Image (cartoon, rainbow, N blue to C red):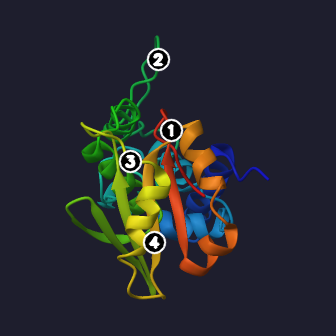
């Protein structure tokens, strides 16, 4: 089932600002984490949530905290909105009158992300931005990302484009299994999406994947991440 769209977020944001004005409040502080939890707790629509927040930001409003990473989208975004002159103040990120609408720095960064060649370094940046958007903290050691969210821990081994002989997904899974020491940690391999990778992953027993808490993260050409 498809989650809420940007119109849903815009309607709720507008109502929050108007309700705050009626209550006599001069400002209202809104976080992407709180707004996303209210509007779309069961869908991965954090980027849409942040886009709506940027779109309703007017001159005089203040971005108190920006998300980590390069996309500008994530659970750390906090904006302080003024509740006065809602109809007269201009947008903080205005659109052009002709042609395509102008992009915010965050939207430009997202467009750049979508054009990455997906080397190991590029794929790692993409995964880190994706983790930011979903509220994970992380550190990186070589080609491994060690992520943590509340009591959950996650080790992600990044496999981008490399020179030399290519190793198959099963061989990488075998290599990863030899490193598993803590059964409470979730482990993943990150690849560029391809039919061959999906086929090889589907050939591995679901029981084995579940017992080992093992998954793959696949990045498509548009920069979208899917966990299988």
Q: Nearer the viewer, mark 4 or mark 3?
A: 3
- Mark 1–mark 3 distance (CA, rounded to whole Å): 20 Å
Q: Residue at x 51, y 43 (%)?
A: 224
Is there any visible trace of residue 167 in the rendered image? yes
Write down the quadrant of residue 115 in the picture: top left
* Disc 3 target residue: 167
Task: Give left or right: position of 197 versus 165.
Answer: right
| Quadrant assignment for the C terminus | bottom right
* Disc 1 target residue: 220
SS at mark 3? loop
Q: Residues within 10 Å of mark 1 (few under 14, many from 20)?
A: some
Q: Residue at x 45, y 23 (%)?
A: 101
Q: Residue at x 43, y 57 (%)?
A: 171
Task: Give left or right: position of 56 versus 160.
Answer: right
- Mark 4–mark 2 distance (CA, rounded to whole Å): 42 Å
* Disc 2 target residue: 100
| Marks 2 & 3, CB-CB < 8 Å contact | no
Is there any visible trace of residue 26 in the rendered image? no
| Marks 1 & 4, CB-CB < 8 Å contact | no
Q: State which tag comes first along the sequence, 2 or 3.
A: 2
Q: State which tag comes first along the sequence, 4 or 2.
A: 2
Q: Residues within 10 Å of mark 3 (few under 14, many from 20)?
A: few
Residue nearest the observer in this picture, 70 or 48: 70
Relative to residue 94, is residue 204 depicted above or below? below
- Mark 2–mark 1 distance (CA, rounded to whole Å): 25 Å
* Disc 4 target residue: 187
Q: How many marks?
A: 4
- Mark 4–mark 3 distance (CA, rounded to whole Å): 18 Å
| Marks 1 & 3, CB-CB < 8 Å contact | no
């Amino acid at each position: 089932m498809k989650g809420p769209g940007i119109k849903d977020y815009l309607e709720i944001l507008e109502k929050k600002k108007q309700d705050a004005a009626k209550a006599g409040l001069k400002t209202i502080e809104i976080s992407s984490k709180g707004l996303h939890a209210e509007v779309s707790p069961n869908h991965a629509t954090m980027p849409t949530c942040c886009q709506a927040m940027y779109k309703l930001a007017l001159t005089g409003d203040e971005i108190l905290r920006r998300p980590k990473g390069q996309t500008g989208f994530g659970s750390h975004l906090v904006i302080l909105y003024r509740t006065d002159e809602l109809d007269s103040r201009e947008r903080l990120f205005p659109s052009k009158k002709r042609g395509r609408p102008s992009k915010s720095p965050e939207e430009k960064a997202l467009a750049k992300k979508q054009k990455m060649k997906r080397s190991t370094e590029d794929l790692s940046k993409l995964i880190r931005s994706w983790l930011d958007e979903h509220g994970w903290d992380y550190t990186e050691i070589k080609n491994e990302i060690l992520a943590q969210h509340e009591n959950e821990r996650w080790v992600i081994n990044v496999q981008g484009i490399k020179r030399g002989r290519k190793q198959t997904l099963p061989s990488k899974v075998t290599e990863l299994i030899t490193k598993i020491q803590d059964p409470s940690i979730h482990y993943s391999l990150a690849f560029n999406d391809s039919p061959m990778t999906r086929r090889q992953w589907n050939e591995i027993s679901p029981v084995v994947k579940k017992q080992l808490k093992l998954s793959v993260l696949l990045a498509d050409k548009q920069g979208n991440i899917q966990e299988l």
